[in-house]
Image (cartoon, grey):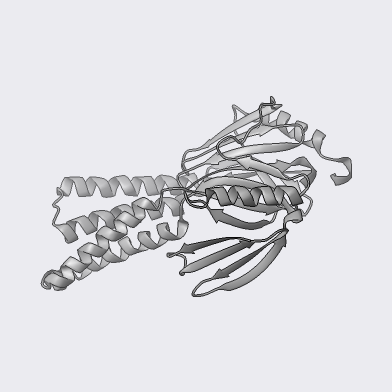
């Protein structure tokens, strides 16, 4: 038996224990708010992939800690400033929160296990100490599962020449997606500030039905979050550490942030054309954004994908 234990401090003190036996795995999850235990057989595993993921719970925790600390300093500055111990404690909390926020963007490698119905089973957080054990687990599963697919974010694409390649840049969300269309599947690699991972979409999961519509740039919520963080960070520096900024800089910053937020609201009403591939359950399995420069290419991709979908799948 091979055992892994991972602890996630900022996710309600979650502890995940994974035990891998000869032909099955048992996964136990326990936190302050949640407990679960389940098992899966190795023969049901259809995909093993690795990727790099930043801890979202740490990012959320540190973000709100910065917000609350800066708000407290701004509103109760006179009371806090008159008590040296309380003032130093508040400064320390602000510094720790800022360090936690910056390090929350450090990505950690995970190995993920997906079943043959494309359901997520579990993932193992890799370290220097468990790398060899993970390789042993992968070999155990490969010996028990037929038609197992392995995808590595370091090299997600085979040497075979794809029929099409589609690269998409989502600048507002700082995301780049590269997809290649092969004979039996779509292979993709997605990168942004918090994750980097490869994925596969097999044509036999699609129904052949196509969604066509238009969707606006719904980024105002993300922009508002960034603005709240910047204002809180500046307030914390001013009230917590006595860093004096010129009023011209402060007013200019507020005008800039207000302008960016206004633009994000306007973009919400500027609709982009989008197409989607439906799966056999009537859900959109995959999206492609369409613009003037790639419209003709996207139509060829749609035609190609539909030609690869099994006839019995088509509605």
Q: Position of residue 209 (x, y in %)?
A: 78, 44
Q: Is residue 91 left or right of residue 97?
A: left
Q: Is residue 192 visible?
A: yes
Quadrant of res 252: top left
**Most distant residue in the top direction:** 161
* Location of residue 36 (image quadrant): bottom right
Residue 207 visible: no
- In the picture, the quarter occupied by the N terminus is bottom right
Residue most extreme to the front: 1
Residue 58 falls left or right of residue 94:
right
Q: Residue at x 35, y 45 (%)?
A: 259
**Seen in the image, is 11 located left or right of residue 250?**
right
Tell me: residue 68, above or below residue 155.
Answer: below
Judging depth in this view, the residue of 103 and 73 nearest the camera is: 103
Residue found 49% across the figure and 67% down from its top: 14
Q: Position of residue 50 (x, y in %)?
A: 58, 46
Depth check: give the residue in front, 231 or 91: 91
What residue lies at 41% left-to-right and 57% top-to-bottom? 59
């Amino acid at each position: 038996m091979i055992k892994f234990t991972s602890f996630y401090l900022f996710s309600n003190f979650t502890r995940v224990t994974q035990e891998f036996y000869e032909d099955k795995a048992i996964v136990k999850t326990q936190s302050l708010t949640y407990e679960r235990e389940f098992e899966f057989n190795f023969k049901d595993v259809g995909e093993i992939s690795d990727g790099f993921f930043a801890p979202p719970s740490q990012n959320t925790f540190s973000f709100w800690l910065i917000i609350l600390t800066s708000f407290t300093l701004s509103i109760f500055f006179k009371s806090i400033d008159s008590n040296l111990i309380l003032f130093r404690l508040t400064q320390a909390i602000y510094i720790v929160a800022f360090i936690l926020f910056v390090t929350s963007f450090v990505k950690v490698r995970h190995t993920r296990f997906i079943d043959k119905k494309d359901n997520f089973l579990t993932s193992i957080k890799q370290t220097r100490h468990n790398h060899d054990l993970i390789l042993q687990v992968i070999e155990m599963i490969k010996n028990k599962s037929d038609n197992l697919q392995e995808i590595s974010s370091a090299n997600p694409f085979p040497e075979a020449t794809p029929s099409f390649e589609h690269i998409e840049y989502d600048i507002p969300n700082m995301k780049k997606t590269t997809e290649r269309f092969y004979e039996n599947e779509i292979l993709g690699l997605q990168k942004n500030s918090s994750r980097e991972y490869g994925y596969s979409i097999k044509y036999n999961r699609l129904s052949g039905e196509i969604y066509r519509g238009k969707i606006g740039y719904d980024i105002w919520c993300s922009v508002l979050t960034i603005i709240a963080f910047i204002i809180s960070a500046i307030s914390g520096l001013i009230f917590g550490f006595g860093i004096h900024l010129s009023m011209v800089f402060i007013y200019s910053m507020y005008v800039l942030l207000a302008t960016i937020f206004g633009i994000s609201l306007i973009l919400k009403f500027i609709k982009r054309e989008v197409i989607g591939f439906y799966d056999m359950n009537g859900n959109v399995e995959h999206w492609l954004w369409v613009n003037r420069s790639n419209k003709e290419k996207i139509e060829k991709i749609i035609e190609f994908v539909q030609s690869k979908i099994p006839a019995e799948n088509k509605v």
